[in-house]
């Protein structure tokens, strides 16, 4: 999926804004529970980057555009 320069800049801005907040660093993308060891749960984590904010940036820009067009 291709993103516009405006969407990329918005994603980088959102990433920078969120970087200082608690709980920003890693996000769980999967959790696996072992069948033979029921008490053990393994988490696979991902270190967030500005690319994780591209869909959020696209939705925000689309909402702004639709709000401007409705006026």
Image (spheres, helix red, strand yellow):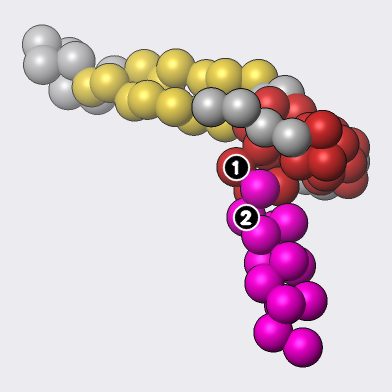
Residue farthest to the top, as pictured: 36
Q: Dot 2, how many residues are within 10 Å of its Cα: few (below 14), some (14-19), or many (20+)?
A: few
Image location of residue 4, percent across then percent down: 74, 35
Residue farthest to the bottom, as pictured: 71
Q: Say left or right for 2 vs 61.
A: left
What is the quadrant of the C terminus in the image? bottom right
Identify the secondary structure beneath mark 1: helix
> Is the magenta region chiefly helix, strand or loop?
helix
Residue that badge 2 annotates: 59
Identify the secondary structure beneath mark 2: helix
In this rendering, the answer to whether 55 lies above or below 49 is: below
Residue that badge 1 annotates: 55
Image location of residue 40, percent across then percent down: 29, 19
* Label pair 2/1, CB-CB below 8 angstroms: yes
Q: Residue at x 37, y 25 (%)?
A: 30
Relative depth, front residue between 13 and 30: 13
In this rendering, the answer to whether 32 lies above or below 13 is: above
């Amino acid at each position: 999926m291709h993103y516009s320069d405006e969407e990329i800049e918005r994603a980088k801005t959102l990433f920078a804004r969120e970087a200082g907040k608690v709980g920003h660093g890693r996000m769980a993308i999967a959790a696996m529970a072992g069948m033979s060891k029921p008490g053990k749960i393994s988490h696979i984590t991902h270190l967030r980057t500005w690319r994780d904010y591209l869909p959020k940036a696209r939705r925000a820009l689309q909402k702004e555009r639709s709000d401007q067009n409705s006026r």
